[in-house]
Image (cartoon, grey):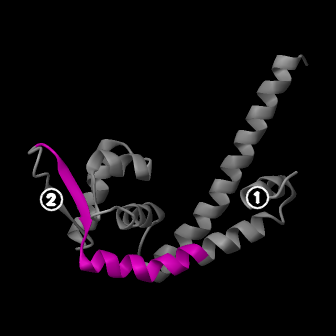
Amino acid sequence: MGIADSAVEVRSSGWRTLAALHGHIEGALERELVRRHELSVVEFTVLDALSRQDGWHMRMSQLARAAALSSSATTRLVNRLEDRGLLTRVLCADDRRGIYTELTEAGWALYREAAPTHAAVLEESLRSAGEVPELSALVGFLHGETV
């Protein structure tokens, strides 16, 4: 195996490790958020992104980037959350083509209720992933530990 082949393998191995850790965490988050709050991980991600905005709204394109979704998937997700009364759409005053999305009071309430669950499950998932030999170095890196 040449140097170039070794570099490719290192990147591939790193990507597989990252994907495994992501799957480990996302699975645990999905189970608990759905069980406790009837909220998927991506729905929580949208509520979380909106909660962090100055003025509490975002353009749909910004929301799509924050949730790592396509425009059409974001529209479907926003429709579902709007149907549940968790967010609303507002026309942009400066650009009539622009649409903002913002949390409703119910959305804020659900976000505040679900955020501690998200934090606790994330912490526990990282702790348990740190016990898996293949994932421990990456978890250590995320915690700021040097290798």
Within 10 Å of the Cα at label 1, are there few (<14), some (14-19), or many (20+) other Cα atoms?
few
Q: Which residue is mark 2?
A: 90
User: Which quarter of the figure has residue 129?
Assistant: bottom right
Q: State the residue at coordinates (43%, 67%).
A: 44
- The x, y position of residue 8, in whole percent, is 77, 26
- Residue placed furthest toward the right: 1
Element marked by disc 1: loop
**Relative vertical location of residue 46 with respect to residue 13 in this rendering, above or below:** below
Q: Say which quadrant the N terminus sits in.
A: top right
**Relative vertical location of residue 9 with respect to residue 42 in this rendering, above or below:** above
**Relative vertical location of residue 98 with respect to residue 7 in this rendering, above or below:** below
Left or right: 137 as drawn, with respect to 62: right
Element marked by disc 2: strand
- The x, y position of residue 24, in whole percent, is 67, 61
Q: Nearer the viewer, residue 9 or 138?
A: 138
**Most common secondary structure along the magenta stretch:** helix
Q: State the residue at coordinates (22%, 74%).
A: 85
- The x, y position of residue 30, in whole percent, is 53, 68
Q: Amino acid at mark 2?
A: Val
User: Which quarter of the figure has residue 127?
Assistant: bottom right
Within 10 Å of the Cα at label 2, are there few (<14), some (14-19), or many (20+) other Cα atoms?
some
Q: State the residue at coordinates (60%, 64%).
A: 27
Label placed on residue 55: none
Q: Which residues are magenta?
A: 97-119
Q: Indicate which disc, 1 or 2, sits on the residue closer to the N terminus.
A: 2
Q: Nearer the viewer, residue 17 or 95?
A: 95
Q: Amino acid at mark 1?
A: Gly
Residue 103 in the magenta stretch? The answer is yes
Q: Which residue is mark 1?
A: 144
Q: State the residue at coordinates (58%, 74%).
A: 119
Mark 1 to mark 2 CA distance (whole Å): 40 Å
